[in-house]
Structure formats: structure tokens, C-alpha cells
């Protein structure tokens, strides 16, 4: 048989052009999906005022040293949707501020005012907390305590030098 006499199909009926075009087509679709994902989601990790936050570190370190010098300690208990703090040491009068900071999702961060229920016992009600790792910062005007907590917590978190007395529970 002669090659001129064989019927030839149009290009779009042959499998090889489609097989060769499939690779670049998949890459284009994957690139468009990646671009959509990058534009539509916010990772929340980059802050606008990084310089101011860096400058505030020295003040924060001084307040952490003050907590050690004053021998302040705290026990955190998360029970029934409330956070209870048992404080030991010469803390000042008035409320405490508790910051619950999520390591990667800034939109989950919360700041609570903990009111004194009795001497050395403070309570507040945070919003819903996602399970996982959280950074806690307990502070007053002249001192601060910081630590990490993984929720759901099986036991209380202890921070600082002194442990609260057993009788204060």
C-alpha cells in the first residue's frame, strides 16, 4: 500500500496532540488555583508595625524581670468556659490583664480583664478558644508573666517563681 493512499485523520482526532497538551494545561490550571489561593487567604503572620514591636521588647523584658524579682507566680485553670488565675506574691491591687495569643492566627487573639474575686484569685470569661497551642501573657502595670499552653489542658498551668498556696483554692 502506498502512503499517499492511506486516509489521514484531522489532528484533533489523533491522541498524541492531546496527550502532549495535557501537561501544560494541568500546569496552567494549578497555577491559577495557586494564585486564587494566595489572594483569597490571609496568613496573618506579617505585621505592619514590626519596628515598634521590636522596640517594645526591651520594655517587656524589664517587666518580666520585675515579676521574677517580686517572686510573683500564677496558676491558670480553664474550667466551665472561664479562666481562673491563682496569684502568689506581692501583686498590686486591681484587675489583671490576660492576653491569649494564637501563634499563627492573629484574628484569634484575645485580651481579657481579670477581676479580683478574692485576694489572690482572679477570674474572666474568654471567647471560644481553638484547641492547640496558645501563648499566655498575664500582666499588671509593672510586671508580666508569660508562658505557653496547649488546649485542651489536662492540668493547670504554673508560671513564675512562687506557686499559689493550696489554701487559696
Image (cartoon, helix red, strand yellow):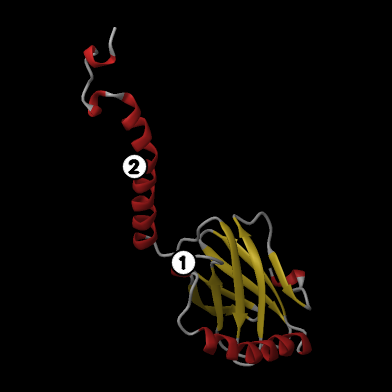
- Quarter location, residue 13: top left
The number of numbered badges drawn on the structure is 2
44 left or right, relative to 142: left
- Quarter location, residue 116: bottom right
- Which element is circle 1 on? helix
Q: Is residue 47 above or below residue 129?
A: below
Residue carrying label 2: 25
| Mark 2 neighbour class, 10 Å CA radius: few under 14, some 14 to 19, many 20 or more | few
**Mark 2 / mark 1, whichever is N-terminal:** 2
Q: Quadrant of the C terminus?
A: bottom right
Q: Are marks 2 and 1 in contact (CB under 8 Å)?
A: no
| Mark 1 neighbour class, 10 Å CA radius: few under 14, some 14 to 19, many 20 or more | some
Q: Quadrant of the N terminus?
A: top left
What residue appears at the point 54 percent right and 55 percent down from the top-left corner? 131
Query: Foreground: 72 or 123?
Result: 72
Q: Which mark is residue 108?
A: 1
Amino acid at each position: 500500500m502506498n502512503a499517499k493512499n492511506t486516509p489521514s485523520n484531522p489532528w484533533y482526532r489523533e491522541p498524541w496532540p492531546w496527550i502532549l497538551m495535557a501537561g501544560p494545561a494541568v500546569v496552567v490550571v494549578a497555577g491559577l488555583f495557586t494564585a486564587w489561593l494566595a489572594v483569597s487567604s490571609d496568613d496573618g503572620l506579617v505585621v505592619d508595625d514590626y519596628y515598634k514591636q521590636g522596640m517594645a521588647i526591651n520594655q517587656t523584658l524589664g517587666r518580666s524581670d520585675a515579676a521574677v524579682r517580686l517572686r510573683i507566680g500564677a496558676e491558670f485553670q480553664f474550667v466551665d468556659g472561664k479562666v481562673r488565675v491563682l496569684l502568689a506574691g506581692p501583686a498590686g491591687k486591681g484587675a489583671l490583664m490576660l492576653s491569649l495569643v494564637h501563634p499563627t492566627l492573629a484574628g484569634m487573639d484575645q485580651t481579657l480583664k481579670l477581676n479580683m474575686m478574692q485576694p489572690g484569685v482572679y477570674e474572666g470569661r474568654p471567647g471560644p478558644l481553638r484547641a492547640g497551642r496558645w501563648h499566655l501573657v498575664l500582666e499588671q502595670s509593672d510586671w508580666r508573666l508569660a508562658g505557653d499552653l496547649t488546649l485542651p489542658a489536662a492540668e493547670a498551668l504554673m508560671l513564675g517563681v512562687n506557686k499559689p498556696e493550696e489554701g487559696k483554692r
